[in-house]
């Protein structure tokens, strides 16, 4: 199956603001890698389940106990911009 | 033998006999670093002050009769994708430049509790994506055996530090071979434990169903000592194993008489260097002479393991790396809206290999392609687990080369992602199955470059795996150390 990726769409989904030239370069490389990856479709034998945890663990429950969380000031000290204990970002939508 | 060449076990004996102090061991490692870092660039951060304080504390504790165990007072290094509270942690990415974690990873905490002295943070391929450290945003590390060559990756900085003696042991992380392949290329021991046995809390995630932390060390026994210090159930990691654990140190001296060793047919032939194949065959013969029953075993799905890996790992990476968006930590780009800010931040902050894998993973998970790629890759993964189960029905361990080649020259594979990915062909199946595997140095090729031998075991099969690994180490008698033209301190 020939691979033809809509690379601009994929970059938008991945939130990567790449130039047209960069997109071209990545598209060429991804075509080669995905062409190799199509070998997974050559799997023979009975149909199988998709694998999950190798030791077969399913759910991990713990007691609902109170414990201290990370220090807020220490956490916020790593943020590019904060105000009154919140993270600050620009508007979610265009405003003009 | 000089201090920086000691194993953990040897250093521990001298510490307890009061022949050396932890501060002596640390100064030996720091001196080694100052003489070799200009050529090797194994470290991103050396925490001299913090390490000296920890060594003084270790010495004071020992003087007071407080002994935290085998790692007490031993200088070790951490790969820079493991969080260290108050010490910069970047995962070799620009997007985390200057990031100071507000917490310790569970492995960091456990090493501190075991009395270990953390020397610093070692270089890696950005977010552990690579096989050479050439994808680090902060420059490549080099191989102490030949500084024109790479140390392997992604835990290449940890491997180089242990090989040259600027740490007595180190932690790495292994998603597709990132501990074992650099260990093989630098002549040290490298271990990937059973998935779920070492907590991933505080490990900057790459591919969560594959990632596993493990040690790089100068002996098989040291790998066991490190493993015993860092593993165990952790409620902070939902994939952590809570059952009973094996005993890696139990059978180190038991030899291989009566054990069945399977040689993997698919991990040989085209693409494997003759020197590697010759050394591995010679070790298999020695194991046979030592009393093991050796048989050839076929695991046909290994031929498509690489394809499955390069769908599963990027798919999980594309989801894990969504958290790097310029909002809560790390680099922030400019943007009029939140979405534009995020897209600019990520384009500026991620290097080419990370960008490539995020795009690949996003595609493999996107609507219309999921069943053909990610879903199918997960079925291949199940088939690989079946192949392993069948093999372990008749043998105790499987063996192969760790890497098809010895260390390659810097720059040789950077323009060909697929060629770089082939570096991991022998190591990937154990990650896909969640099984333990270890690389032991067994010799040098004619260019004086190390060759590694891989021993694989079923899930939680660490006891028998270490038993065989210790025998391989003893049969190989590999004692060479790299010779580097050192700079004056």
Image: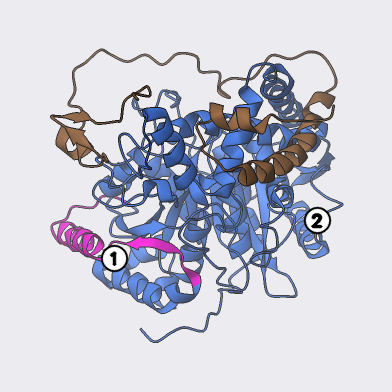
SS category of the residue bearing label 1: helix
Tell me the quarter of the picture where residue B184 sits: bottom right
- Residue B334 belongs to the span the image colors magenta: no
Residue located beneath label 1 in the image: B15
Residue B55 part of the magenta-drawn span = yes
Q: Where residue B383 appears, x then y in whole percent?
A: 74, 24
Q: Identify the colour of chain B in the image.
A: blue
Q: Nearer the viewer, residue B52 or B298?
A: B52
Closer to the camera in the image, B487 or B250:
B487
| Residue at screen point 73% across, 70% down | B445
Colour scheme employed for the rendering of this structure: by chain
Q: Position of residue B448 (x, y in %)?
A: 68, 75
Q: Is residue A71 visible?
A: no
Residue neighbourhood size for the residue with mark 2, other residues' Cα within 10 Å, grouped as few (<14), some (14–19), many (≥20):
some
In the rendered image of the structure, the colour used to display chain A is: brown
Q: Chain of mark 2?
A: B
Quadrant of image for the C terminus of chain B: bottom left
Residue B207 x/y as whole percent:
53, 34
Question: Which chain is indicated by disc 1?
Answer: B
Q: Which residue matches tag 2? A: B272
Q: Position of residue B149 (x, y in %)?
A: 63, 69
Position of B27 with respect to B318 (left or right) is left
Residue B320 is at least partly visible in this image: yes
Magenta span: B40-69
């Amino acid at each position: 199956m020939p691979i033809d990726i809509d690379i601009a769409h994929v970059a938008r989904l991945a939130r990567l603001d790449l130039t047209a030239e960069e997109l071209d370069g990545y598209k060429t490389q991804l075509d080669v890698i995905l062409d190799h990856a199509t070998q997974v479709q050559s799997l023979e034998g009975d149909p199988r389940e998709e694998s999950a945890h190798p030791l077969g663990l399913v759910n991990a429950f713990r007691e609902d106990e109170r414990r201290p969380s990370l220090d807020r000031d220490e956490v916020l000290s790593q943020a590019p911009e904060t105000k009154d204990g919140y993270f600050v970002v620009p508007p979610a939508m265009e405003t003009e | 033998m000089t201090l920086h060449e000691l194993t953990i076990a040897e250093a521990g004996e001298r510490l307890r006999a009061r022949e050396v102090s932890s501060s002596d061991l640390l100064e030996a490692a720091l001196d080694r670093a100052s003489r070799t870092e200009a050529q090797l660039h194994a470290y991103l951060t050396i925490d001299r002050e913090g390490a000296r304080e920890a060594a003084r504390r270790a010495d004071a504790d020992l003087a007071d009769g407080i002994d935290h165990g085998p790692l007490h007072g031993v200088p070790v290094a951490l790969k820079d994708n493991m969080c260290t509270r108050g010490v910069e942690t970047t995962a070799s990415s620009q997007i985390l430049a200057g990031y100071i974690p507000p917490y310790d990873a569970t492995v960091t905490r456990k090493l501190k509790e075991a009395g270990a002295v953390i020397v610093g943070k070692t270089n890696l391929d950005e977010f552990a994506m690579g096989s050479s450290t050439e994808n680090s945003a902060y420059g490549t590390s080099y191989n102490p055996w030949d500084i024109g060559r790479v140390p392997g990756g992604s835990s290449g900085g940890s491997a180089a530090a242990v090989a040259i003696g600027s740490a007595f042991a180190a932690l790495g992380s292994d998603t597709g071979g990132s501990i074992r392949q650099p260990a093989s290329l630098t002549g040290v021991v490298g271990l990937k434990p059973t998935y779920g046995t070492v907590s991933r809390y505080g490990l900057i995630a790459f591919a969560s169903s594959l990632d596993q932390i493990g040690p790089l060390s100068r002996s098989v026994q040291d790998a066991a000592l490190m493993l015993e210090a860092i593993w165990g159930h952790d409620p902070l990691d939902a994939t952590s194993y809570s059952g009973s654990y094996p005993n890696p140190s139990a059978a180190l001296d038991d030899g291989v008489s009566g054990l069945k060793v399977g040689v993997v047919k698919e991990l040989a032939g085209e693409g494997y260097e003759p020197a590697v194949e010759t050394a591995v065959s010679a070790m298999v013969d020695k194991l046979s002479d030592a009393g093991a029953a050796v048989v050839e075993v076929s695991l046909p799905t290994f031929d498509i393991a690489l394809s499955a890996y390069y769908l599963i790992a990027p798919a999980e990476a594309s989801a894990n790396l969504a958290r790097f968006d310029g909002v809560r930590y790390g680099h922030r780009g400019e943007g009029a809206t939140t979405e534009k800010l995020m897209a600019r931040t990520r384009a500026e902050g991620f290097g080419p290999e990370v960008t490539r894998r995020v795009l690949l993973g996003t595609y493999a998970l996107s609507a219309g392609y999921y069943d053909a790629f990610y879903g199918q890759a997960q079925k291949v993964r199940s088939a690989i687990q079946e192949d392993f189960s069948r093999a372990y029905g008749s043998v105790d361990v499987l063996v192969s080369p760790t890497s098809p080649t010895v260390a390659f020259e810097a720059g040789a594979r950077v323009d060909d992602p697929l060629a770089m990915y082939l570096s991991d062909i022998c190591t990937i199946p154990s990650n896909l199955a969640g099984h333990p595997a270890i690389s032991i140095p067994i010799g040098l090729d004619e260019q004086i470059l190390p060759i590694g031998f891989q021993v694989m075991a079923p899930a939680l099969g660490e006891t028998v795996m270490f038993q065989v690994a210790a025998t391989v180490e003893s049969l190989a008698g590999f004692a060479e150390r790299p010779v580097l033209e050192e700079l004056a301190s």
